[in-house]
Structures are given as structure tokens and as C-alpha cells.
Amino acid sequence: MIHPLRIRQRNAAQPRAGASYVLYWVQMNRRAVSNHALAYAIERANELGLPLLVYEALTFDYPEANDRIHTFILEGVPEMQRQVEALGAGYCFYLRRSKSDSNRVLYDLAKDAALVVTDDYPVFVAATHNERVAGKIDVPFYTVDSSCIVPMNAFGKREWAAYTIRPKIQKLLFEYLEPVPKVRLRHRWTAPKPEWHTEVSDIAKLVASCAINHSVKPSISFTGGAIAARKHLDQFIASRIARYSTDRNSPSNHATSELSPYLHFGQIAAVDVALAAKSNPEFLEELIVRRELAFNFARHCPNPGSLEALPDWAQLTLRKHAADHRDYVYSPDQFEHAQTPDALWNACQKEMLLRGRIHGYYRMYWGKKIIEWSPTHQQAQDTMLAIHDRYALDGRDPNTYTSVLWCFGLHDRPWGERPVFGTVRYMGLEGMKRKTDVPSYIKEIEYLERTGKDPFRI
């Protein structure tokens, strides 16, 4: 029932005879509904006459591990466990708190599995894991794309802009824009929980017990998990989508879905969002065409976090202007702590520090000014990625890499030539003042900073 273009077998192993279960290893799609990978794992379990074990983990040693990201992920675990067990599957959540805890739980679970299914994801630790694990287990290892509506495998090469991928997506969309098939698990899990299972109840206590960066506090705006994700979607459909086409680029109007953290951590399915919002073509352009252009870029680019991934024209113009004089230069620390003379830029950075995201339109301005105020283009990119890695709930995502590199010309075209930028598009404060309500946005962020509370929290 799951389209074969979503599925890749990453090794040549055969299913284990006499196995106890099929294992689904959750990495990026942390949900038990509308999940192609989970549905495929159920299919295979039914085919083999076995129960299914769902394994989800969180470790202390991913890059920039901190309280914000840990809390957001852990908030989704109780609902994930409830939904998985309601399907009749077993569930194991493993919290690796420090280096002394086992780092072999996946391999130990795989020893009793007929095969392993996991999430196909083109960046960050999931991409690294999938390359490494495939050759280390002696059963079939499948990665399944449940992040995109049109599977990444539908496009065999890198697309260079929205205008090249858009007609291809539109041609295929009718085939894939449909609910994920519901597959009933025939063999219920009856064994006790694996010994590594961590029961998630007191989240603050669990987070405090982990050897991570405790200086990055949880978001004041977002609660993790499928329930919170659905609340955001429901509010968007009920009260925001009608204003999306006219107000989406004005942050103080709050007309966007604010679903990017939930899409990144897979706590809601892009296909469910698209089906709910199919009346608005502008929103679907962002959710499907632009987002899946980012996944295509990440899948086919050897290093999507490098300036070398830019188109030739952008690399040439940036090299030409590499030594240009900068009127103002700020350090990475000044950027991180919002210490520039630009009140709008500072507000954007403070939104990142407090909420864990920046409104998409202002994030463009935020990135362009970092280019203008950094001593080199490379340091500008390093600063943007470091801030996203540490603070953004929607960071370490294909959209992160494309959004950052867009500031340097990716998926764009040449504009008028100017210092530092060359022919890469420039964005300035006066343009933001003409197009958006800057004073209202600054006032809103000042309130967040002063009170530590977000009146728009859902």
C-alpha cells in the first residue's frame, strides 16, 4: 500500500528467520498517524506474521543538544506511546542521558528483529545514521520517506529553482496528495517492554538529568507533540488561512501556520496539513513546492551546508566582492546576543532566542544583514547556521540550509550589483518599513522579553 518510490532498501540482507518482531526505528517522523514509514513497517510485520516494536530515542550528544530541543521532543513522547500502543504495537523510548549509558540499544533490538524500518531524511544525524547502520546489521534496513508529499525519489536530480520543480510536482501531486493508508496490525505486541524503556512523565526532571547545554531554555511559545501540532493546524484553518494570502509577510499580523517546528520533528504530516489547507494555493506553494525543493536540494547536494552548493553565478559574484569594505562588523557573539544598533534585527534575533523561530519573511532580512555585517561571507553563513543549530526548533532541516543559502543566492536570480553582495539580492530596513509593521513587531518582542510570556501561544 505504500508507494515503492518512498522506500529504499539500504543493504542486501534477507529477513531473519525465527525473529521476534519487525522493528520501526523512529528518527524524524515522531508520530503514530499519517506515517508512511510506520505503515510500511506494519505491512511487513503482517506479511511475516510478526508483531511490531516501535523504538524511539533521544541522546545527549547530538550537536548543540540543549533543554529547548530535548523538552520539545520529550513533550511528544507520551502521546506517541499512547497512539502506538493503541495500534497494538510495542513501544520503547530510550533516553541516553550521558556517555556512560549504552549506545548500542538499536543494535541490540535489531538482533531479535526480522528487519528494520526507519525514516528517510537527507540531512543531520538521521542521514549519517542511515548510511552507517545499514552495513552494521544483518537484516534488511529500509528507509521510508514520510516527510514529503511527493517522494524525494520521484526526482532523480537536483532542481535549480522553484520554477523547475513546480511543474513536475504539479504533474505528480494528484497521485500523492491523499491520506496515508491505515493498515491494521494483525499480531498484537504481548511481550513486556524492553529493559531500555524510559517512562516519560516529569519532563523537567528528565531534561535536568541529561548531560546537555542547560543554558538554552525551552521555548516560551511552542509545546511539542502531535496534540499541540494539531491545535496549531486547527487554529490556522479556523482563523488565519483566510488572511494568509494578504498578511503572511507581515509578522505582527500572525497569519502563518507556525507549524515549522512540528513539521521538522515529524509531529504532524505535511500531507495532513496540505489536505486541510488545500483551498489556499499560496500556502500550498510554500508547504509543497518550496519545502520539497529544499528536500530535493538536500538529497542531491553532497554538502547542503556549504557555500560551494551555491549556483555558479552566486559563487562568482561573492568571490568578486569578498574583500569589499564593510561599514559595520559584528562578532558571532554580538549577533547571538542581539547586540547591534538595528532594533528590527535585534527583535528578530530575540524572537529566535525566546520563541525558537523567526517569522520567515523577517528571517530573510535577518540573514541578509548578517552578510552585510560579517567580515567574510563564510563567517556570515557559519553564524546563521550556528544560531539555528542552537536555538531554532525548526533548525537542522532541509529548509534551514536552503533558507540560509537563499540569502547568498540559492534558488534566486542575479539582481543589481552592490558592495559585499555583488549581484545577490539585498534587503534593507527601509524596505521592511514600507512592507511591514515594524513598530508593532518590535513592541511585541519587547513584551516577550519583559514578561517571558507569549500572548499568541496556542
Image: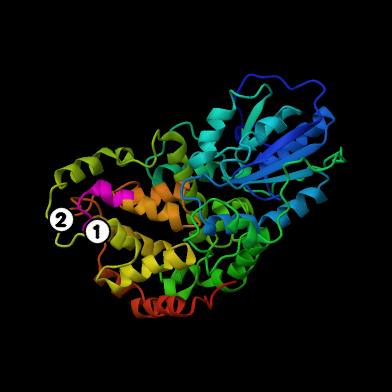
Q: Which residues are magenta?
A: 372-382
Amino acid under disc 1: Tyr
Residue located at (31% from left, 49% from top): 381
Q: Measured along the vertical axis of the image, is residue 401 above or below residue 25?
A: below
Magenta region, main secondary structure: helix
Amino acid under disc 2: Arg
Q: Measured along the vertical axis of the image, is residue 75 above or below residue 377?
A: below
- Which of marks 2 and 1 precedes in the sequence? 2
Report the residue marked by disc 2: 418
Quarter of the image where the N terminus is located = top right
Element under label 2?
loop
Does the image show residue 274? no
Given residues 269 and 140, the one toward you in this image is 140
Q: Measured along the vertical axis of the image, is residue 458 above or below residue 309?
A: below
Instruction: Check contact, mark 1 vs mark 2: CB within 8 A.
Output: yes
Report the residue marked by disc 1: 426
